[in-house]
Image (spheres, rainbow, N blue to C red):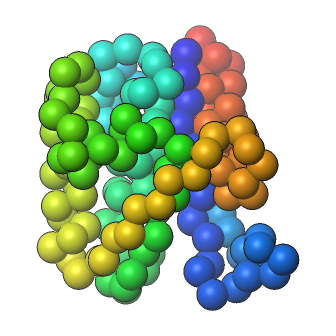
Amino acid sequence: MAGWGFVAAAPSAQCAGQPLAFQTFFGPVVASPGGLPVQAKAFTNNTAELSAIAAALRWLLAGQLQPQPVNILFDSTWAANQVRRIWRPKSHRHAIVATQRLLDKVGALGFSLTWHHVRAHRGHFLNEAADRAAAQGAAACRQAV
């Protein structure tokens, strides 16, 4: 089982490099037709990272924010480059295309996304919070079985 997680942080509230206000979101990677945030064919770190990006894009589409500049921090170059169409999919094509469509919708609403790579497991506050959230998503999936 695998889980996904992302963090939504208030961009202007910074204190010692850590946001004062943030919210975490998490869930299991779903390997079934119509699965959310996207249908995965396997429970892997790649499908978990892709699911986290899709969930964050769905959150933006849900109307929590007015269209504005948004920074997306990611540690999976594979997932971010697939979604941004920098790399062509060789696997998980259905989930990648579904996430690309979400990205297109977010852009059409007027959000301006800037993507920033952060190194995984190097103590970046928001990345570590997202990793903890993903672990919660995986744990919730195991408890449901």
Q: So how many labels did they put on this image?
A: 0
Res. 32 image quadrant: top left
What residue is rendered at 38% in x and 69% in y?
114
- Left or right of 128: which side holds 47? left
Q: Quadrant of the N terminus?
A: top right
- Left or right of 142: which side holds 27? left
Res. 87 image quadrant: top left
Residue 132 locus on image (x, y percent): 72, 41
What residue is rendered at 21% in x and 46% in y?
86
Q: Is residue 113 visible?
A: yes
- Left or right of 59: which side holds 5? right
What residue is rendered at 32% in x and 24% in y?
40
Q: Is residue 77 above or below residue 70?
A: above
Residue 36 locus on image (x, y percent): 35, 37
Q: Is residue 56 above or below residue 86?
A: below
Residue 128 locus on image (x, y percent): 72, 47
Q: Is residue 33 visible?
A: no
